[in-house]
Image (cartoon, rainbow, N blue to C red):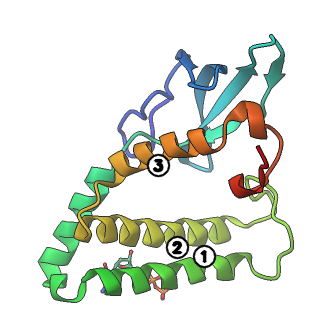
Amino acid sequence: MMASNGKESCGINGDMSSTSFKGNGEVFANKSHSVRVNGAAAAADSCQSKSLNGDVKKRTERFTFSGEPTVEDIRRMQAEFTDERDWNQFHQPRNLLLAMVGEVGEVAELFQWRGEVTEGLPDWTESEREHLAHELSDVMIYLVELAEKCHVDLPQAVLRKMALNRQKYPASKVHGSAKKYTEYKD
Ligand SMILES: Nc1ccn([C@H]2C[C@H](O)[C@@H](COP(=O)(O)OP(=O)(O)OP(=O)(O)O)O2)c(=O)n1
């Protein structure tokens, strides 16, 4: 099934199966397919996690993103947007940081006083979901531009940070625990 923007979503069409090997010894087998939710293309991932001792744990259907736009696409589109308006003069790192934090506040506002919210937001109206999509996009747009203006290559930085996170939190050690790494004694 095609994404609503007419472009094929990365890895979510048809019945693509993939297996990836993680550094911590877990083997993931992903079988992906796309589904359409209220006209928007979304994808659900059925994941099975197999640990080294052979246990197979069925995960819930996992929501996945479209493959496009990439982070670099978003950086370029926002650069075009600001250039066209001669707004670069206002978009220094500190201003972008403040703008991003303001947008994070707007996301928080959508969740405040609701109590716990279930994954997938089943109790939210379409208009509330779209509002959330807008606010999350604002956060991401400013985050990407902030990284650009600080000369941080964000996609590569994320890869490096995730590698560090895996070292800090070995799955074999922290499985099922939300403790901070500093709380582990060994
Ligand atoms: N100086 C600006 C103003 C806006 N934007 C872009 C980036 C954000 O995606 C969005 C933010 O626009 P608003 O400041 O109008 O904020 P909202 O869209 O959240 O509107 P509101 O505050 O009314 O909810 O527009 C920008 O790049 N630079």
Q: What numbered label is drawn on residue 161?
A: 3
Q: Is residue 136 above or below residue 91?
A: above
Q: Please name whichever residue, 153 or 139, is drawn nearer the observer in this view of the structure.
A: 153
Q: Tell me whether circle 2 and circle 1 mark residues in contact (CB < 8 Å).
A: yes
- What x and y, as percent, mark residue 58? 81, 24
User: Left or right: 37 with respect to 138?
Assistant: right
- What x and y, as percent, mark residue 24? 63, 26
User: Left or right: 45 with respect to 20?
Assistant: right
Classify mark 3: helix, strand or loop: helix
| Alpha carbon distance from label 1 to label 3 | 24 Å
Count of numbered circles on the image: 3
Q: Circle 1 sits on which residue?
A: 107
- Indicate if the residue with disc 1 has its beta carbon within 8 Å of ligand 1: no
Q: Dot 1: few (<14), some (14–19), or many (≥20) neighbours within 10 Å?
A: many
- What x and y, as percent, mark residue 29? 63, 17
Determine the image quadrant of residue 88.
bottom left
Going from N to C along the chain, the mark reached first, 1 or 3, is 1
Classify mark 2: helix, strand or loop: helix
- Indicate if the residue with disc 2 has its beta carbon within 8 Å of ligand 1: yes
Q: Tell me whether circle 3 and circle 2 mark residues in contact (CB < 8 Å).
A: no
Going 25% across and 65% down the picture, which residue do you hit?
A: 148
Amino acid tagged 2: Glu
Q: Circle 2 sits on which residue?
A: 135
Going from N to C along the chain, the mark reached first, 3 or 2, is 2
Going 85% across and 67% down the picture, which residue do you hit?
A: 116
Classify mark 1: helix, strand or loop: helix
